[in-house]
Amino acid sequence: MKKVLLVGSNFLRAPYPVSPVGLCMVAAALAPDWQVRIFDPLLDGADLAAVVGEFAPDYVGLGIRNIDDVVMEEGVSFVNDVRERFARPLRRLTRAPLILGGSGFSIFPQEWLEECEADYGVVGEGEAAFPSLLAALERGRDPLAIPGVVAPGSPPPLRAARPVLLDLLPFAEIDKRIDYAPYRERGAYPIQTKRGCARRCVYCSYPQIEGRTFRCRPAESVVDEIQQVSGRLGDVAFEFVDSVFNDPPGHAESICWEIAQRGLKPRLRTMGVNPAHVTRELIDLMVTAGFAQIDSTPDSASPAMLQRLRKNFSRADLERTATIVREAGMPTMWFFLLGGPGETEETIAETFAFIDRFVDPEDMVHISEGLRIYPHTALYDTAVKEGFVESGESLLTRHFYVSPELGRERLLEIVGREIATRPNCVRSSESTPPPALLQEAVRIRREQGLTEPMFRTLLRLRRQALGGV
């Protein structure tokens, strides 16, 4: 049986380590026909040269998840790190074909192929396309005939890899494929309940990667995975990593109901909830299912900006959502993205007025300045029209859009002034806590047996450092 080495390129441990669910999904798809090994750079003592030498792979897949930290001021690009830490060493260590994939790769395929001197890449989902690519190479067939497969200098694929049927995919079984111990204390076991997004947010690259329709896993399958992982690992936190958890309506409710029906008691958290579909019944079901916190990512609370960002909810929906989660005692992290097309000082004031009136002071609010520009988005078209970027210019290097009505420096000034008087508001550039603060939070939580979300512990320590109560 021939060998495939799957290499993760995410080396970030802050604010918490993220296990390589994408690579594990691909590994599960390959498992029947290939001997697969995963190299996870977050594991202590991970040595790429030693693993390549010992395993002697016939093919190597390099997963690219992160492009940069999406922070406009003093932000960090990961392009050089991916190239120097992983791609170039792999080219020196083995003659096996190097194949790229992952969400970060799918946005900039030709740029990454050139940066990494790779042989092939898969744009979009890899569970079906990657095994098909390996089979084509083994049989001497044309790899570029496979949807989503690209090579250096080849034209962009007419479409991404064909969307897979999620209810037929094997579970990732991350804890069986890597040493999961380093992720248990601060990380969470990732669970994906759907792919694709039917929304039209001006800046978003999700539809480009996963498609423009919702493809949902059956609730029974999702809960089967949670139940099996809990049986293997015991008490472990789970995070639903969908771009938006409660979209389309009814899907999140069915998952929560299934968890409750089985009498399970998992610890759950989730990424964004869509204010258009938040109801008291949904939040009550989430509390019953075991949710300890949620994220809400409205990006703005200005009615005009919600329209310009092409959000599918109104200010009234947002106010209703904030009221419901606060009355339910659901800890919530809020995320706002300021500086988009048409943003003014007045629209920013509307967002901060919403924060003051509706957001629980115990909840943390992340404020990002400027919008990262990605190709094939409405924001890209606006950015070209307004001269932020040139048509056809590579955007692998960080480019940000800021409303011309404000300008970069004025935006930074306004945000700095507003968050200075609000201890629960932090800039995105400050959202990763300093190591000393994080260590203190971990110590306090252990000594006091705290079960509150980590962000509330960190926020309390931050208030104390700022001289607050």
Image (tube, rainbow, N blue to C red):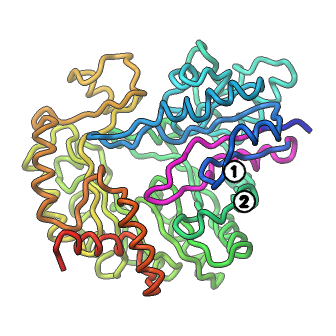
Region rendered in magenta: 5-34
Location of residue 143 with respect to 457 vertically, above or below: above
Quadrant location of the N terminus in the rendered image: top right
Q: Amino acid at mark 2?
A: Glu
296 relative to 67 in the view: left or right:
left
Picture residue at 58% right of the left edge, 35% below the top: 85
Give residue 281's position: percent from left, percent from top: 41, 78
Give residue 124's position: percent from left, percent from top: 59, 36
The answer to the question of whether label 1 and label 2 lie on touching residues, with beta carbons closer than 8 A, is yes
Question: In this orientation, which residue lies closer to the viewer: 450 or 384?
Answer: 450
Give the farthest residue toward the top: 153
* Structural crowding at the residue carrying mark 2, measured as other residues with C-alpha within 10 Å and reported as few (<14), some (14–19) or many (≥20): some
Q: Which residue is mark 2?
A: 173
Q: Which residue is mark 1?
A: 24
| Dot 1: element | helix
Location of residue 309 with respect to 358 vertically, above or below: above
411 relative to 282 in the view: left or right:
left
Location of residue 225 with respect to 394 vertically, above or below: below
Query: Does the stretch in magenta take in 79?
Result: no
Query: Does the stretch in magenta take in 29?
Result: yes
Give residue 142's position: percent from left, percent from top: 77, 17
Q: In this view of the protein, can residue 284 be seen by the observer?
A: no
